[in-house]
Image (cartoon, rainbow, N blue to C red):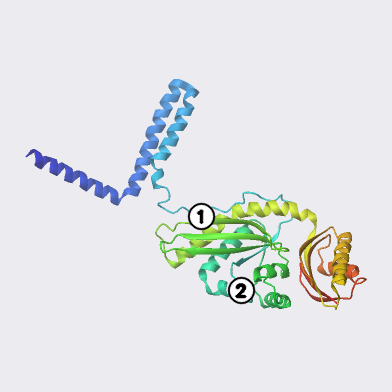
Amino acid sequence: MKYLNLFIGFSLALTAFVFAAEDNHSTRQRANSAYDELDDAISAKISKKFGRQNEGASSQKNKDRHDRYSQYEGKYPAKEAPSQSITSLPADFPTPTIMVLPSVSGKGTASLQVVANNPYAKAAMDGVNEYLTANRYSVKSLEGSDNLDKVIQIQNSLAGSDEDLAYLASLVLNADIYIKYSGSVDKRGIVSVELNAYESSTARLLGTQSATVDGLGRNSELDRQANLRTAAKKAMPGLESKIVSYWQDDYRKGFKYRVIMNIKGDYDDNQLEDIREDIRQNLKDSFKNVKGNSMTSKTIDLVVYSDSDDVQDVYSQIRKVVKPIAPVKMINSSKKLIIMDIN
């Protein structure tokens, strides 16, 4: 009989646990409320008896109260918090113009094709662009036949180079910085996004940031896309701080232009060396700063810093410098790029 009573008691306890588990969320809420009332009552009595000396103990109890339920954090997805920049520019300081494209190798329209055909790529790009616009950045898009045609035209002008679409597009669209992104989605619905920011005139890497979002079992196509947008936004504050650090320092140096000069004339080695040296020195005397990207026997590749934000004005200054040395001809130009031949 004793064992029968124990069995019945265990069965009733197990039944109560099962029903409690079925409504565990509401139970936790009631328990939480009860703990709150009990803790508040105890804290009030202690405070009345001992005064302010027990504020630290009350604070610890509040922490312990939170810890009791910390095991449930993340089980129910929270609403997405508004994005905030962790390092921002002063209100009166100009913000950089930024362009975003997927990290895709190859020339032509490969990047745009990825965005158009892959909803995951589109979702990640939307997340980055939403963050940028919410934090008052000007965002450029390559979508549009006129812009794309110009990029491809310049890409063809640089035959034999390995310049990618994102870099050239930033020069054509007058973007100060471009962001390339990549991402992945696993079978469990966990998504990861990696962002890389580059300076447009030289394609110098400014920083990298990544983020991961766990779908918590929500693994539909729409959930994955939403989580990719969230992961992209989650990665942006860290990347933004690196962009802002660069931009505040670099903006004061002047407007930057990449200048590529192809030497087409028939010159011997000594003449080529004299031409390269004379051009470089004269440009240094005419602009705020001049930095070399690369130089070959037939190519001069530079970045010039100017007070002018008009590419035609900059080209005219360069032409005045180069013309006394050798005949010069404009081949192509965009907002931040000048390609010219020296005959």
At horizontal 81% and vertical 68% (from top left) the residue drawn is: 311
Q: Is residue 206 left or right of residue 281?
A: left
Figure check: 146 above or below 140: below
Residue 69, horizontal then vertical, whole percent: 39, 42
Mark 1 crowdedness (10 Å alpha carbons): few <14, some 14-19, many ≥20: few
The image quarter containing residue 330 is: bottom right
Q: Look at 25% across and 46% down and name the residue there.
A: 17
**Pointer 1: what residue?**
80
Locate the C terminus and report the quarter of the image it occupies. Answer: bottom right
How far apart, in angstroms, are the residues tagged by discs 1 and 2?
36 Å
Secondary structure of the residue carrying numbered label 1: loop
**Residue at point 55% right, 55% down?**
234
Residue 95, picture quadrant? bottom right
Q: Residues within 10 Å of mark 2 (few under 14, many from 20)?
A: few
Check the picture and name the quadrant holding the N terminus: top left
Looking at the image, which is closer to me, 83 or 98? 98
Residue 52: image x %, image y %? 50, 24
- The three-letter code of the residue at mark 1 reads Glu
Residue on which the image places disc 2: 106
Q: In the image shown, does 204 or 138 lie closer to the viewer? A: 204
Q: Are marks 1 and 2 in contact (CB under 8 Å)?
A: no
Which sits earlier in the primary sequence, circle 1 or circle 2?
1
Residue 221 in picture, x, y percent from top left = 45, 67
User: Which disc is residue 101 wearing?
Assistant: none
Where's residue 173, x and y in %? Answer: 71, 69
Type of the residue with mark 2 = Gly
* Count of labels in the image: 2
Residue at far left of view: 1
Left-right relation of 169 to 181: right
